[in-house]
Amino acid sequence: MSGTITEKILDKHLVEGKKEPGSEIAIRIDNTLTQDATGTMAYLQFEAIGIDRVKTELSVSFVDHNTLQTDFRNADDHRYLQSVAQRYGIYFSRPGNGICHQLFLERFAKPGNTLIGSDSHTPTAGGIGCFAMGAGGLDVACSMAGAPFRIKYPKIVGVRLTGKLQPWVSAKDVILEVLRRIDVKGGVGKVLEYFGDGVKTLSVTDRATIANMGTETGCTTSIFPSDEITKAFLEAQGRGGDWIELIPDDNAQYDEIIEIDLSTLEPMVALPHSPGNVKKVREVGKIKVDQVAIGSCTNSSLRDLKVVANTLKGKTVAENLHVTISPGSRQVVEHLVRSGEYLDIVRAGARIMENTCGPCIGMGCAPSSGAVSVRTFNRNFKGRSGTADAEVYLVSPETAAATAITGYLTDPRELGEFPDIKMPDKFIVNDNMILAPLPPEEAEKVEIVRGPNIKPLPQFDPPEDVLSGKVIIKVGDNITTDHIMPAGAKILPLRSNIPEISKHVFEAVDSGFYERAKSYGGGFIVGGENYGQGSSREHAALAPKYLGIKAVIAKSFARIHMANLVNFGIIPLVFSNPDDYDSIDMDDDIEIQIGDLSHDLFLHNKTKRINIKLEHSLSAMDAEILLAGGKLPWIKKSMSGGK
Ligand code: MIC
Ligand code: SF4
């Protein structure tokens, strides 16, 4: 039976494996996307695999994360990315064109396709019925080289939407409600598949907002049907030919059901410092706010910014408040300019930024010390804004605009009547900032340009039979990749320079980590539940590996980060009994005999003179990759017929 949308797509793309939740499957990947901050590493790895041209139906390289260009390093990355795209048959979206997920939705995403992207919010394309997943750059490189992508067959959770959202309540409030119910690890191993009559009341960009921030539940992806509304969106983008209908069968069976009556939802807010810490805005009360930041891949569509423009129209942003707006794409900007709504925003005193990730990843507009920042973004991890003691609240564009006017956290329903929002019948399509792939004869002649900031990939040896060393750090639950490998304006330019970026590992958590890792010659990390949640950045595995980390022993792992650990030869191990977490401390001397990783393992804590039983959920192939010293040596061997 293949009643759900998820099953329909997975059935069509299945290359290997059984349709049983938790068992490993391999699927064919139609499309890939990368962004600049993860892209340089992904393409260095693609080059190292040694394929002449991408083997996917379509691959796109975006530049949206780091466009500050405070010196040559960033510009070097952009130049490298453009030349590599032209060399290997990849579309290239030039800096300034927009945020990868918004652009992919507008210009490339197809219902029924599979997509992996080197960014954790790749599931945004689930809003159009595409099965889209975040992955590490190396996995994306492998899929560009034609390799299938491996995931655990997910549990399929049906999220039944009924009713219709009230005025001033929007898609962001829906996903905040999902997060309120299932929190930041409630989606692990699952696909959130939306169905029911309420779906018809949501536009494609509303659906994309929900699918985008579904990432924060830890799910494999989120997906919506492709229906008449999807068709109208694609037609309005001049891409009607890309539409197919994709709806669940009447007798579709879901592993679990979540019921949401849209008409009962109210404006919601995620409080510091977790996207899962959700309350109703009216319950939280009137907190004084210092900054409002609107945009990000979650809430920067034309619809969202029209709501903001029409709410701000004729008003001035509150005194002492600093308001920024980062539109999702040039298409969005062009519409706002032509309709005059851009002027409404400018006149209200909001600062319109570039069409990039901007403040969402700490690229400028950091809040002041101890500030309260209200954002339409998807993550509010401590320090991510660039200010360690800032308090970040996540809300809808409606709540952000209302807050911008009053200066304190405001339930937008207090503003009275909802403005009349007019969406265009056709979008203004202008792809002049997207370079199409060159034909093979021309592509072959393209010279790849590498500046001094593009350092060669580090090489790693296979692991020893007995791993030994000290615990270099012990951390708690829900450690994010932002904790492990921070981003922001200072560190993002180092993404293609592993020796330099590795100096910043765990910087905000424990400034002694780098020195200890160096002086001990590497060792181990001990973590709690959901270790590595958040971003797909493989630097959170690659840089620790460079510092000699051999294994991470945790209570549980987030999906993408665990795959990245395997890809770079760091062994992800789990305590058989979670209480054993308490019997291991920083600086303990430990030893683990790994053998061929086919058995349960024991950790010998030499300092405490105890043995601790460990487990892992590695597949046979993961074990092979780890024993080969990582995925790059492994794939090179397998592609040259060495296995
Ligand atoms: C993020 O939102 O954390 C990022 C920056 O987009 C990351 C990717 C990266 O670290 O480059 C993500 O979500 O995967
Ligand atoms: Fe960019 Fe923020 Fe979206 Fe990540 S979450 S892709 S940094 S806008």
Image (tube, rainbow, N blue to C red):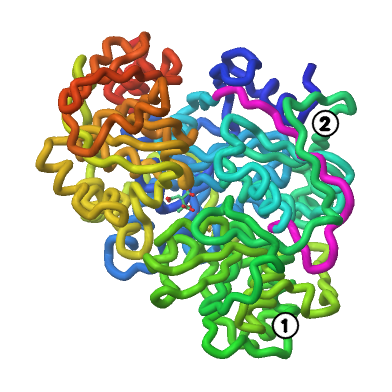
Label 2 sits on a secondary structure element that is loop
- The magenta segment is 152-172
What residue does disc 1 label? Answer: 340
Q: Amino acid at mark 1?
A: Gly
Q: What percent of the width, then of the height, locates residue 164?
A: 87, 55
User: Foreground residue, 385 or 592?
Assistant: 592
- Distance CA(mark 2)–CA(mark 1): 41 Å
Q: Could you say which quadrant of the image residue 41 lies in?
A: top left
How many neighbours does mark 1 have within 10 angstroms: few (below 14), some (14-19), or many (20 or more)?
Answer: few
Q: What percent of the width, then of the height, locates residue 288?
A: 57, 79
Q: Are marks 2 and 1 in contact (CB under 8 Å)?
A: no
State whether residue 367 appears in this view: yes
User: Foreground residue, 113 or 154?
Assistant: 154
Q: Could you say which quadrant of the image residue 419 lies in?
A: bottom right
Q: Amino acid at mark 2?
A: Pro
What residue does disc 2 label? Answer: 248
Asked if the beta carbon under badge 1 is closer than 8 A to the nearest atom of ligand 2, the reply is: no
Q: What percent of the width, then of the height, locates residue 639?
A: 38, 19
